[in-house]
C-alpha cells in the first residue's frame, strides 16, 4: 500500500515489489504487511519428506487476514486471531520446507520446530517378583498381570477380568493367560574368565530335548552359532516302516558345538572367547520340563603357537 498527495507522481520499482512477500524480521519477531500476500520460508532447519514435525508459534497480533503454516505440500490450520498455537504436520512433496503464509497485518514470534521420533521397537513388559523370604527383588517375569494376590501358598493373578492360579501342578505350566509358551533357558559359561578358551561341546541332563534358539550361541569375541535337533541325534531305530530317533543316552543329551556361522556353520572358525552365552529352548513346548545339569566343555586356547 502506498500513499501520495494529489497530483504528485509516485515512482514504484515493480521488480523489487514483485519479489517481496510482505514478510520482514524485526529482532525475534516476523512481521507481515497485508499489501503483499506471500510466504516466509525457514531455510535453516532440514526437513525430510515422510517425517512428522511438531512446531509451536505465537501470533502476537493479526488483522485483515490469516496466518497458515505448511511443511512442503502439507498445510496447517489457518489462524485468524492472536494466540499461542502448536501443531504436528507430516512433511510431503519434493524438497519440502517449513513455511508461513499470510495475507494479513500480523506479528509472529516464538517459532520452534522439532522432528517427531516414532519408535517401532516393541519392548517386553515384565513383572518384578519380590521374595519375602530373602527380603529382596529376585527376578523378572514376562507376564503382565492386572493385579495379583497370594493366598494359602498359592499365587492368584487377574487379567482382563479373569482370575488365574499359578503353580497348580498341571502339565500346562507354560500356558500363561491362554497362550502356551516354550521353555527358554539363557545362561553364560564363564569359568576362568581371564583365560581365552576353545568351546568344544555341551551336554545336559533333562527329560526333554533342548536346542538353541536361532543365533542362540554367542561368544565374547562376537562369534555366533546355533544347534538344531539333528546335532543331538544319537541313533535312529527302524523296523522298515516306522523310524524312531534317539537323542539322549540315559537321559543325557550331548552335542559338539558348530562353528562361527558368520563364516560357515560347518567350516567357520571354532568358538573361542573368555565366555560363551547359550540360549536353550524346548522345540516341542509340551509337558513339564525338568533340567538337572548343564555342562559346557572347553580347553584353553593355545595362543601364539605357530
Image (spheres, grey):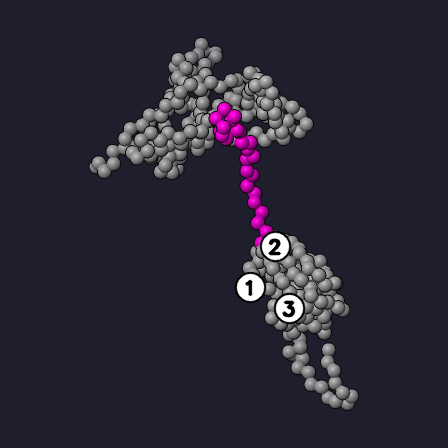
Residue indicated by mark 1: 44
Mark 2, secondary structure of its residue: strand
Percent across and percent down for residue 243 are 46, 14
Residue ranking furthest to the bottom = 7
- Of the 4 image quadrants, the one containing the C terminus is top left
In the figure, residue 292 lies in which quadrant?
Answer: top left
The residue carrying mark 2 is 53
Q: Position of residue 259 (x, y in %)?
A: 36, 32
The answer to which of marks 1 and 2 sits earlier in the sequence is 1
Crowd tier of the residue under label 2, counting other residues whose Cα lies within 10 Å: few below 14, some 14–19, many 20 or above:
some
9, above or below 100, in the image:
below
In the image, residue 129 lies in the stretch drawn in magenta: yes
Residue 107 lies within the magenta run = no
| Left or right placement of residue 185 versus residue 304 in this view | right
What is the distance, in whole Å, between disc 1 and disc 2 at their CAs?
15 Å
Look at 38% across and 38% down and name the residue there. Answer: 222
**Viewer-closest of 269 and 75:** 75
Amino acid at each position: 500500500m502506498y500513499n501520495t498527495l494529489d497530483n504528485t507522481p509516485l515512482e514504484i520499482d515493480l521488480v523489487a515489489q514483485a519479489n517481496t512477500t510482505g514478510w520482514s524480521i524485526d529482532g525475534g519477531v516476523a512481521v507481515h504487511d497485508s499489501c503483499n500476500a506471500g510466504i516466509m520460508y525457514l531455510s535453516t532447519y532440514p526437513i525430510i519428506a515422510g517425517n512428522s514435525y511438531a512446531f509451536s508459534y505465537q501470533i502476537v497480533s493479526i488483522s485483515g487476514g490469516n496466518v497458515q503454516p505448511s511443511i512442503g505440500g502439507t498445510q496447517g490450520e489457518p489462524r485468524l486471531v492472536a494466540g499461542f498455537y502448536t501443531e504436528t504436520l507430516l512433511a510431503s512433496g519434493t524438497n519440502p520446507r517449513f513455511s508461513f503464509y499470510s495475507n494479513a497485518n500480523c506479528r509472529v514470534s516464538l517459532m520452534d520446530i522439532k522432528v517427531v521420533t516414532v519408535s517401532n521397537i516393541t519392548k517386553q513388559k515384565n513383572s518384578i517378583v519380590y521374595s519375602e523370604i530373602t527380603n529382596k527383588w529376585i527376578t523378572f517375569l514376562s507376564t503382565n498381570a492386572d493385579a495379583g494376590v497370594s493366598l494359602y501358598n498359592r499365587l492368584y493373578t487377574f487379567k482382563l477380568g479373569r482370575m488365574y492360579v499359578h503353580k497348580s501342578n498341571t502339565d500346562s505350566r507354560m500356558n500363561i493367560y491362554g497362550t502356551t509358551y516354550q521353555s527358554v533357558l539363557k545362561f553364560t559359561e564363564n569359568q576362568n574368565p581371564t583365560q581365552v578358551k576353545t568351546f568344544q561341546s555341551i551336554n545336559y541332563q533333562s527329560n526333554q530335548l533342548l536346542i538353541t534358539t536361532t543365533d542362540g550361541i554367542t561368544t565374547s569375541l562376537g562369534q555366533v552359532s546355533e544347534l538344531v535337533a539333528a546335532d543331538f541325534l544319537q541313533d535312529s531305530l527302524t523296523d522298515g516302516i516306522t523310524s524312531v530317533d534317539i537323542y539322549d543316552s540315559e537321559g543325557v543329551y550331548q552335542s559338539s558345538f558348530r562353528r562361527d556361522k558368520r563364516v560357515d556353520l560347518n567350516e567357520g572358525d571354532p568358538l573361542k572367547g573368555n565366555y560363551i552365552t547359550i540360549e536353550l529352548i524346548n522345540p516341542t513346548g509340551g509337558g513339564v520340563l525338568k533340567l538337572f545339569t548343564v555342562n559346557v566343555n572347553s580347553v584353553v586356547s593355545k595362543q601364539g603357537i605357530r
